[in-house]
Image: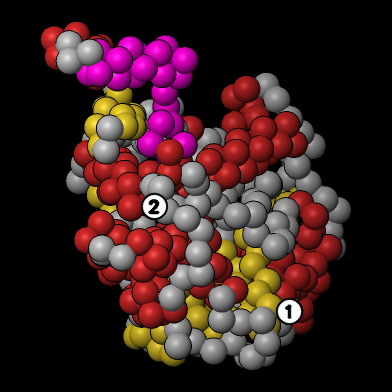
């Protein structure tokens, strides 16, 4: 049975959806004003794995991940580039999709865009005003924090921490300095919509509440996102009426021990990492630490991930497709059911790979390899052809194959000096050659 850490209550709990036949999950997606960095990629990969695990256990899963396409950051990017907000949003939504596809992240079942849900946002804001939880002032609509006594229950922050962490504008027209914006006025040259409070646009927090209600209903099973969203974003969603059984948050990604920031120049874009590292290796690296723990990305991180995948794919080479044994897969499934313990799942997968190499019976070896591949499927890994993986990144395949053939002939001729010379040429191209059973196989070096 799947167990997950619930941020609401801060403990691991058995997971069961409200509807035993239908699990509903919503994850906060990107604000599309720039390219995705490795920190943006981590929740996308983590919750993709969770969706895969859920689909193996629940008859129907509806997974929604939104696109925030109206935001002050988008307006700023559009102004800087002398472009429209729609053009900026479209460009970076497309880039986000391409980056995630390269990491093996499956599209969500639903991808709502904030700008398509202005009507539902206005309806919820009107409800909050009628309930005495929101008020209008200076052409704004604000949520009044004291009107929700349970505010802070998710994050556990005290009032002083809330004010510091929320980074809200302390304006004299607020009833409480913690009050946050539900609706704000727009200038004529800014995105805006007509509303009962004038021409304007929504605050960020109300967007997710409206999209969840529109597509998943009043009650969902899982609400996910990065730990930075726990407060104030998810806290504010709860105040607005978002109801989730489980609140799940992944940890930060740091770079060589430092927080990513433009000022430090250490923001790692996924698109840049993909130029040097296969997407599957980046995915493995993002899953190498438990999702709730911080992940520190160093220059060695993608290299280690690629080397680990080399070992796993190596166990799959030359193995026929057969039916796996549930017993072989069980340790991997058990690890994932234990709050998505991906490090333990990887350890179990490497144990399976070792068994493939040590098993003397060919049929049993093939069965273990099949189990390894199926286990990898839960993590979005090991679904490529092993030879294609080994040779990925090879530039001139024809040149490499010609050198391999030339070297094989030199070995047949017992011209060891020439064979060694050709091996060195291959190494210079980043190619490693493995001689086994009279045959030579090659792969790109990690």
Q: Main secondary structure of the magenta part?
A: helix
Residue furthest to the left: 417
Whether 8 is drawn above or below 348: the answer is: below
Q: Which of 4 and 288 is in front in this view?
A: 288
Residue furthest to the front: 413
**Residue 303 image point, x, y percent:** 26, 38
Residue at the disc numbered 1: 217
Residue at the disc numbered 2: 316
**Residue 332 image point, x, y percent:** 36, 72
Q: Which residue is drawn at 78% across and 60% down?
A: 117
Q: Is residue 399 magenta?
A: yes
Q: Is mark 1 on a helix, strand or loop?
A: loop
Q: How far apart are marks 1 and 2 (CA)?
A: 44 Å
Q: Does the magenta stretch include residue 271?
A: no
Query: Which contiguous range is marked in magenta?
Result: 388-412
Q: Quadrant of residue 116?
A: bottom right
In the picture, measured across the screen, residue 203 lies left or right of residue 359, that is right
> Does residue 178 appear in the picture of this structure?
no
Q: Residues within 10 Å of mark 2 (few under 14, many from 20)?
A: many
Whether 435 is drawn above or below 175: the answer is: above
Whether 337 is drawn above or below 432: the answer is: below
């Amino acid at each position: 049975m799947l167990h997950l850490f619930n941020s609401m209550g801060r403990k691991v709990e058995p997971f069961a959806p409200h509807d035993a036949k239908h699990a509903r999950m919503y994850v906060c997606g990107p604000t599309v004003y720039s390219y995705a960095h490795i920190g943006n990629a981590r929740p996308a990969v983590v919750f993709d794995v969770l969706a895969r695990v859920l689909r193996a256990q629940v008859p129907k899963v509806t997974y929604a991940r939104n696109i925030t396409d109206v935001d002050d950051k988008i307006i700023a990017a559009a102004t800087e580039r002398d472009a429209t907000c729609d053009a900026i949003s479209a460009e970076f939504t497309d880039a986000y999709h391409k980056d995630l596809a390269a990491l093996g992240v499956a599209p969500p079942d639903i991808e709502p865009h904030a700008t398509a849900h202005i009507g539902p946002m206005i309806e919820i804001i009107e409800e909050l005003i009628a309930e005495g939880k929101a008020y209008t002032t200076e052409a704004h609509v604000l949520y009044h924090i004291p009107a929700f006594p349970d505010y802070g229950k998710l994050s556990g922050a005290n009032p002083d921490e809330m004010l510091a962490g929320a980074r809200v504008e302390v304006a004299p027209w607020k009833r409480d300095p913690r009050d946050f914006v539900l609706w704000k006025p727009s200038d004529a040259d800014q995105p805006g919509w007509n509303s009962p409070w004038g021409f304007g646009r929504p605050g960020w927090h109300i967007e997710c509440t409206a999209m969840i209600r529109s597509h998943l209903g009043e009650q969902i099973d899982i609400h996910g996102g990065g730990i930075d969203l726990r407060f104030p974003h998810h806290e504010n969603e709860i105040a607005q009426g978002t109801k989730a059984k489980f609140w799940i948050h992944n940890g930060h990604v740091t770079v060589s021990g430092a927080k990513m920031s433009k000022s430090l120049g250490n923001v790692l874009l996924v698109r840049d990492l993909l130029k040097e590292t296969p997407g599957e290796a980046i995915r493995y690296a993002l899953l190498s630490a438990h999702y709730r723990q911080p992940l520190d990305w160093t220059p060695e991180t993608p290299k280690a991930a690629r080397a680990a995948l080399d070992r796993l794919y190596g166990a799959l080479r030359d193995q026929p497709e057969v039916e796996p044994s549930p017993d072989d897969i069980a340790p991997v499934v058990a690890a994932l059911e234990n709050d998505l313990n991906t490090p333990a799942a990887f350890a179990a997968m490497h144990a399976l790979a070792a068994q493939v190499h040590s098993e003397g019976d060919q049929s049993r070896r093939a069965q273990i390899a099949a189990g390894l591949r199926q286990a990898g499927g839960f993590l979005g890994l090991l679904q490529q052809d092993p030879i294609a993986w080994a040779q990925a990144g090879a530039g001139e395949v024809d040149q490499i194959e010609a050198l391999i053939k030339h070297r094989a002939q030199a070995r047949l001729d017992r011209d060891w000096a020439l064979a060694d010379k050709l091996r060195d040429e291959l190494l210079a191209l980043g190619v490693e050659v493995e001689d086994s059973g009279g045959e030579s196989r090659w792969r790109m070096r990690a």
